[in-house]
Image (spheres, helix red, strand yellow):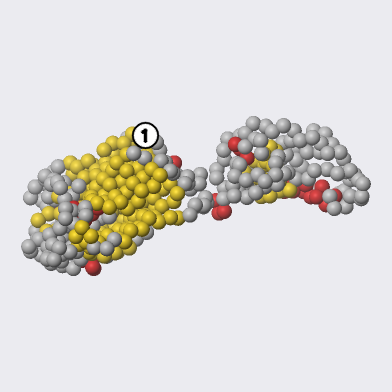
Amino acid sequence: MLRRFALYMTLLPALILAYTLPAGAQTRTYVAYAGIYSSGTVYNLNDMVSLGGEFYISLAANTVDRPPPTSPSQWALMGSGGEAAGATGTTSGPMGPTGEVGPMGPAGASGATGAVGPAGPAGPAGATEGLGGAVSETRTLMVSALKSPPLVHNSVTLLSATGAGNIERIQLALAYNDGSPTEANLGAETVLTIVVDGKTYSCSLGLFLLWDGYATTDGENATNQLFLTKYLGITNATSTSNQYIGGYRRIYIKYNNSINISIAMPPAFNGAIWSQVEYYSGVAPVGLYPATRNVFHMAVNEWASSTIAPNQVLTILPTVGGPGELESIYFVTSAPGQVEPHWLEMSPDITEDGSDFRYGGTEDFFGNQFYGDQFQGRADEYGIARYYKSTPPDNTTYWTAYRYFRESPMVFNTSLGMIWQNGPAGGGAATRVGTLAVYYTSN
């Protein structure tokens, strides 16, 4: 702070002098301090800015979006922490150690303007500085919306885009009616496909939006299972015939060249679709998203199409090499009868950078205790989407949950993997388990 104050006190007499020189006196070039560098600000010739503890002077007019450390033709490095590195018209001798600031003396006669020295080599890039230390989104949020009338077909495209951009949120609702209480499970039988930069990922729509577990014949209206959080919400569901279901998921998917998002409904689908995909077009501002969220991936174990044996070990996330970040884990389980889900006593096991982390139980991993049969807590980071013991003829116990790592990131540098083991025979094992892991790698 003292060093910066000394710089201001050094410049102030010169600025005063600029307004007191008599006509015909010699002139000199003055520097105007413009504050901390901002990429959106237009700078004039001889404007001075600070960035990462360094000071720079503008060598050109109308300079915008040219960071000083990497733009030597637009900016000259002056010095660190408030000490000027190059001469700008001074006639003084070599600078000694900085003393205490004394009183301001009278303005002296103006000297000849010195030549601006050559720009030095650019130093390493410093931390991004902005309003409040945060990097703001500068692109316009866009939406691809679909409202279809009742129709009969089996696939529809929700979004197709080329160039660079990133997805922010997917919202979807389906209505199905075949004229009788239907056995079609819209969540489990509808497939979502995401093709990002030529790489294809797919899973059931019910797993992606956590609709799985909303049964078709449990005889219970499921509207009391609705919920809204920052990252996930179920906004409509009827399980008497499973004719209506809706929800959203906020998810970051970066694409460099292209993206296509589509769904394929059950055969002879007779219903309506409503969807909104929100996204930004263009390259994201530097520093807005961590580099560990660069490349999108999904690891899937489908709930509806497979069964699990007692004591079976399930790989939730195959071992991933290199640096990256885990975004979320979705977990869907069921077993026949109105039973206690004792399989939740088993502990998820995450191996991060060679270190093993074993949680106290499945329900604890998802932010709950005692299965949530008294209170189904739902928060932004974790919660139970549904815990329900259906009556005959369905006669099934469902337990579904989610956990996000957005606000408490799980970043890995060399590797990440996750497994889960089913409960023992006779001790409350699940018969079906579905999981979805979303993660990113840096490349």
Residue drawn at 40 percent across, 56 percent down: 143
Tell me the amino acid under the disc marked 1.
Gly
Question: Which residue is drawn at the image coordinates 59% and 49% (left, top)?
Answer: 40
217 above or below 404? below
* Closer to the camera in the image, 310 or 115: 115
Q: Quadrant of the C terminus?
A: top left
Q: Is residue 318 left or right of residue 309?
A: right
Q: Is residue 150 left or right of residue 101?
A: left
Residue 439 placement, left or right of 304: right
The part of the image, by quadrant, that contains residue 232 is bottom left
Report the residue at 84% width, 36% height from top. Answer: 91
- Residue with the mark numbered 1: 322
Asked if residue 60 shows in the view, the reply is yes
Q: Secondary structure at mark 1?
A: loop
Q: Residue 353: image x %, image y %?
A: 34, 36
- The residue lying at 34 percent from left, 39 percent from top is 198
Nearest the eye: 397 or 254: 254
Q: Is residue 417 above or below residue 376?
A: above
User: From where the camera sits, is residue 374 visible?
Assistant: no
- Residue 277 in the image, given as x and y percentages of width and height: 36, 55
Mark 1 crowdedness (10 Å alpha carbons): few <14, some 14-19, many ≥20: few
Q: Nearer the viewer, residue 375 or 72?
A: 72
Q: How many marks?
A: 1
Residue 293 position within the rendered picture, expressed as x and y whole percent measured from the top left:
40, 43
Where residue 146 sits: x, y (%)? Answer: 33, 58
Q: Image quadrant of residue 386? A: bottom left
Image quadrant assignment for residue 57 = top right
